[in-house]
Amino acid sequence: MLYREAGQFKTSYAADQALMPITQDRVGLLVILVVTFVVIPVFATDFFIGSIMIPFLVFALAAIGLNILTGYAGQLSLGTGAFMGVGAYSCYKLATIFPDINIIVLILVSGVFSALVGVLFGLPSLRIKGLYLAITTLAAQFFLEWCFIRIAWLYNYNDSGAIEVPQRKLFDIAITGASATPTVRYLIIAGLVAVLTLVAANVLRGRIGRSWMMIRDMDIAAELMGIRPLYAKLSAFAFSSYYCGVAGALMVFMWLGSAEVEAFDINHSFLVLFMVIIGGMGSLVGCFMGAAFIWVLPIIIRAVPQMLGLDILAATTEHIANIIIGVLIIFFLIVEPHGLARLWQIGKEKLRTWPFPYAST
Amino acid sequence: MELIHSILVAPFIEMVAYPDFFLQVVWEGFVAGVLYSLIALGFVLIYKASGVFNFAQGIMVVFAALALVSLHAMGVPAWLAVLLSLGIMGLLAVGIERLVLRKLVNQHDAILLMATIGLTLVLKGVGQLVFGGEPKPMITEQLGLPTGSTDWEVFDGIVIFQHIDIAAAVIAVLMVMALGVFFSKTRIGRALRAVADDHQAALSVGISLHQIWAIVWFASGIVALVTGIMWGARSEVSFALEIIALKALAVLILGGFTSIPGAIVGGLMIGVGEKLFEVYWGALFGSGVEAWFAYVLALIFLLFRPQGLFGERIIERV
């Protein structure tokens, strides 16, 4: 009843092409932005911001990166963790080499290195596709992981092999390092994620994004219609890896504070893939939903025995969490293979026709 | 110049200078390759019959071996434990077919792959919950597997053959032959091949897809148990095996997803190649090249032959 576009007339091409043509959507987005940038920083606890919102946003960004590649361009990838690692390590190196440049600029630049590596490992996609390609991305995963361990230059030859985030300031406020408050870090991440999501939304509906979707739907047909697979596939790899790289840099610099190779291992790649699949392939909203679901669910599962006052070993809850997540993934795939985004879409459709679901629209 | 020498010349000089060591390395690689092949075999069986890329094969190996070891630890005699573990794998196969595969027919490849990754999580959780996460020794002697080693004197040196490795190779060969006979001579085997060729045609001549899928998952469960025993006997039964099992994916690429000979040859190539590379060229890169060599080899290989060594030629139409 409330969610209906009746009476909203478009009088210009610009209005017709708008990212969100329906007023209710724009209001909804505004509410979300207000909640993100005003309500949460002001009212939420440090725990909520630090262990739920920050990881959620970082993973949402990584999921957008993977979704560009898998959901929009149809190239299945299992190397997300490694590409995030490239972003993190190059950001670390950049921060060591250029200590005077603002860290936010460096985070954004470090994505470029990730994009270059992504293009390199995307080259096989010109010859192979589908599951075969998925396995070649495992090559990227394991090779890069090995690089992070063996090339000591990447972590400045320190003994621990971990990268430590240096203290950096913006307008005299600490934004990275130990003394940066979760709220400040959260606001920076939220800002970057909002801007990058907007960019992604516009790239995806533009010429490049449409060429990716043509490649996904049928690459030979797309080629016959004048899409050059070389450019389309490699640009998808570059864009996707850029987002993953920035997410990786954010993960280390704004969330963890320090990281070792284990932070970028194959399980991490799977985690992001789960988010994309559960959220919905080929949907930006889905990335956020999937990230929220996959990140928050284990936290809840771990919290339940405590709340009930049961005395269960931490390892046992961990295993039970594994089982529940696995079962839920299978359940979701069976019930709604197109993910939470499709449920959301169905819900909106129902709202539009409510209370007369049979009325033709 | 120095570098070119150390890449192209020095390793070969070393190989010729110490042929016994070279043989030892090749043998080690060969045995590792046999085990990769066995894991890959489980993948191929399932992929052929149902088009599902079974990511859970690695954890199935661990699960089967853990079930066997734990049953024996509870006091069940070894032969009965083997039978019971087979029973567990059978139940698992039927359960997976009933609860997962049947409901996901005709879905996109990626979704089926994801379902098996979900399955991996479930099996991992259940395995750790029921059997415990710590590594366990395999009950090699109780199963009647040989232990000890034989020295073979050759080229003024000795090459050591562990008996368990020889047994692994022999059992692998026997199993592949048994599978070959099963596929070509028995009724069910022929039905499996029919399903692999064309689901709809198989359905129309009265082959039950559900039944075939359960059987094929059970078959790869048996392969998983054998692999688990062999692998466990060489090192120990632990969840770390799962990551090693991922290497079987590289084997699959090399051999082609649908080819049993491909899985064998690919496995041996990767096993031997990886060991040789690690021993003779590894020092150039720093150690640990084993972690990625298989995948990079597969990747380079794919650039020249996208369908793998023995894969069916990919023909695409718009």
Image (cartoon, coloured by chain):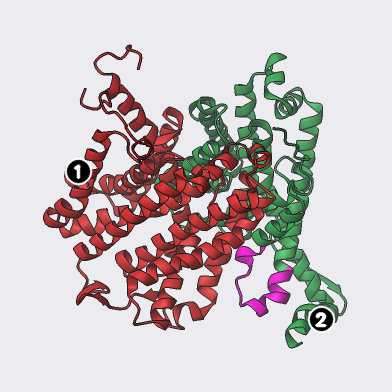
Figure colour of chain A = red
- Highlighted range, magenta: B276-293
Whether pointer 2 and pointer 1 mark residues with C-beta atoms closer than 8 Å, the reply is no
Q: Residue at x 54, y 41 (%)?
A: A213
Q: Is residue A163 visible?
A: yes
Which quadrant of the structure image shows residue A307? top left
> Left or right: A117 with respect to A336?
right
Q: What is the x, y in percent for residue B131?
A: 44, 47
Name the main secondary structure of what is drawn in magenta.
Answer: helix
The Cα atoms of the two marked residues, 2 and 1, are separated by 68 Å
Q: Residue at x 81, y 70 (%)?
A: B23
Q: Is residue B287 magenta?
A: yes
Q: What is the x, y in percent for residue A207?
A: 51, 46
Relative vertical location of residue B181 with respect to residue A273 in this rendering, above or below? above
Relative vertical location of residue A333 with respect to residue A259 in this rendering, above or below? above
Disc 2 versus disc 1: nearer the observer: 1
Q: Quick one: quadrant of the N terminus of chain A?
A: top left
Can you tell which mark lies on residue B9?
A: 2
Q: What is the x, y in percent for residue A284?
A: 39, 44
In front: A194, or A203? A203
Figure colour of chain B = green
> Left or right: B61 with respect to B306?
left
Question: Please, which chain is the residue tagged with disc 1 on?
Answer: A
Can you tell which mark lies on residue A31?
A: 1
Query: Helix, strand, or loop for circle 1?
Result: helix
Q: Residue at x 70, y 43 (%)?
A: B257
Q: Residues within 10 Å of mark 2 (few under 14, many from 20)?
A: few
Q: What is the x, y in percent for residue B159?
A: 79, 71
> Left or right: A213 with respect to B277?
left
Residue kind at label 2, given as amino acid type = Val
